Image: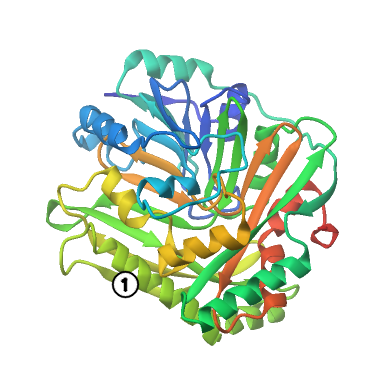
């Protein structure tokens, strides 16, 4: 295994020469985040596991590859988040590999349903210690990545002009969809469903995923940011939500942690207004019930892969305050059984219950019927599975899909019996504030 310390430079500057390079990715929390210590750059994969619409299940091959690549834990590398392994995304439509009864609409995007590169090297940047490293399992791969990194200070972000934003739902249609979901809940079809709309903006020139990533990250304190680049498009994510993290746990077992988010309020214009909005969220029966329901769902999902008696609720309905919104987040963890691989983990947990509803499969059937269009990368997972057995994967919310001149920003929210249709529509626009600000358009202009 290789570990080279390199001169510190801003992670975006390091990534700049790789802008537009297919399968070159950066995981980088918002520049204002205090929780995002590490930025990770990976490029030039030795192999890529993909699945397109109607394609074959890639997860058996992923398990086989990770088993073959498995690295021992070495003290010198402790504390480094990623050394080598699989990195990329799993789109929402990949759920069909784990639940045969699902008949999901196809993704409307040109990106595959799954794209996970196998990387033999990575560049790591500790934003707390201002130290940078190139690490990996192969010296040639480490050298190629090191030589590709930039170090020059970047100039101002280049911003294309976006005229307006449209949606696949009008406001009235979205309210009607929420009302329909409430009727379904009254009929006992499910308890909660997460409905979304897709906001679309057209630029006057092809959009640079790297420049949009820089602009979004510059004003963000979300700690699961990412730029993923492919031949047919790019994904820019500004997610505040962890899908799962795998780390060393007690008794020599691997500990898995899920952190679902449910419940949202905008930030206030003044400190007093902000505190009132946060207090309202913390004490709102609808939002607390929604969060607790999903925490229960995640606890049940984790029980499928964890040792009996090890699942814990480490936090329930905890306040998370970000630049544009307040959220409620819960934290559930457990010790995984020894025989559990990536396929079993995704089969038990994917997609995250916070972006489907409960019961999960019934809610997903409703989502497919009401939304009528696939979600693509949105509501899937973005992150990595390390060759040493660890993982960190975010829920792909606050996520933009870039294809040429078009940028799509899907946004949604959970519908329960206590939901108000207008309130649910307004919540989606609150969640879109960061993305719309990065595009230079106003939420009031959505048509």
Residue 193 or residue 297, whichever sits in front: 193
Above-or-below relation of 349 to 315: above
The answer, for residue 355, to whether it is visible in the render is no
Q: Position of residue 71 (x, y in %)?
A: 22, 31
Q: Is residue 1 left or right of residue 445?
A: left
Q: Is residue 233 left or right of residue 446?
A: left
The x, y position of residue 79, in whole percent, is 32, 43
Horizontal relation, residue 37 to residue 349: left or right? right
Instruction: Give coordinates of residue 363: x percent, y percent.
Output: 48, 66
Q: Quadrant of residue 332?
A: bottom left
* Among the 4 quarters of the image, the one containing residue 280: bottom right
Residue 146 or residue 186, whichever sits in front: 186
The answer to whether residue 59 shows anywhere in this view is yes
Considering every residue shown, the one lying at the far left of the view is 251
Q: What is the count of numbered marks?
A: 1
* 170 is higher (above) or lower (below) than 246: below
Give the residue at x 48% y 24%: 43
Dot 1, crowdedness within 10 Å: few (<14), some or many (≥20)?
A: some
Q: Secondary structure at mark 1?
A: strand
Residue holding disc 1: 313
| Position in image of residue 31 (x %, y %) | 60, 47
- Quadrant for the C terminus in the image: bottom right
Residue drawn where x is 42% and y is 65% of the image: 360
> Within the image, what quadrant is residue 391 found in?
top left
Q: Quadrant of the N terminus?
A: top left
State the colouring used for the structure image: rainbow
């Amino acid at each position: 295994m290789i570990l080279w310390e390199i001169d510190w430079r801003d992670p975006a500057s390091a990534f700049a020469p790789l802008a537009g390079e297919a399968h070159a990715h950066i995981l980088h929390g918002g520049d204002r985040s205090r929780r995002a210590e590490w930025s990770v750059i990976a490029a030039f994969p030795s192999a890529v596991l993909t699945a397109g619409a109607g394609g074959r299940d890639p997860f058996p091959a992923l398990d086989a590859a990770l088993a073959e690549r498995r690295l021992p834990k070495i003290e010198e590398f402790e504390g480094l988040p990623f050394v080598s392994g699989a990195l990329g995304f799993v789109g929402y439509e990949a759920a069909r590999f784990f639940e045969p009864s699902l008949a999901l609409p196809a993704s409307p995007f040109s990106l595959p349903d799954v794209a996970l590169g196998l990387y033999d090297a990575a560049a790591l940047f500790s934003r707390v210690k201002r130290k940078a490293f190139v690490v990996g399992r192969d010296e040639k791969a480490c050298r190629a990545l090191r030589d590709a990194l930039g170090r020059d200070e970047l100039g101002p972000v280049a911003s294309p002009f976006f005229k307006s934003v449209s949606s696949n739902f009008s406001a009235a249609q979205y309210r009607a969809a929420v009302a329909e979901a409430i009727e379904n809940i009254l009929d006992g079809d499910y308890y909660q469903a997460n409905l979304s709309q897709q906001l679309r903006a057209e630029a006057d020139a092809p959009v640079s995923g790297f420049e949009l990533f820089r602009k979004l990250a510059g004003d963000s304190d979300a700690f699961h940011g990412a730029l993923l680049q492919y031949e047919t498009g790019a994904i820019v994510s500004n997610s505040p939500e962890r899908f799962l993290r795998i780390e060393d746990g007690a008794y020599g077992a691997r500990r898995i942690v899920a952190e679902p988010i449910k419940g949202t309020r905008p930030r206030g214009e003044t400190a007093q207004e902000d505190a009132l909005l946060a207090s309202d969220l913390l004490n709102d029966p609808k939002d607390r019930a929604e969060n607790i329901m999903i925490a229960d769902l995640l606890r049940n999902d984790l029980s499928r892969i964890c040792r009996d008696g090890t699942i814990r609720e480490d936090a329930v309905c905890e306040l998370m305050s970000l630049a544009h919104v307040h959220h409620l987040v819960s934290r559930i963890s457990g010790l995984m059984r020894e025989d559990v691989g990536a396929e079993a983990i995704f089969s038990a947990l994917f997609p995250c219950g916070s972006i489907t509803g409960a019961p999960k499969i019934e809610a997903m059937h409703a989502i497919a019927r009401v939304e009528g269009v696939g979600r693509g990368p949105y509501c899937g997972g973005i992150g990595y599975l390390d060759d040493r057995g660890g993982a960190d994967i975010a829920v792909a919310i606050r996520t933009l899909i870039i294809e040429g001149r078009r940028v799509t920003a899907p946004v949604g929210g959970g519908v329960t019996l206590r939901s108000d249709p207008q309130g649910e529509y307004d919540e989606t626009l609150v969640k879109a504030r960061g993305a719309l600000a990065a595009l230079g358009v106003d939420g009031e202009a959505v048509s």
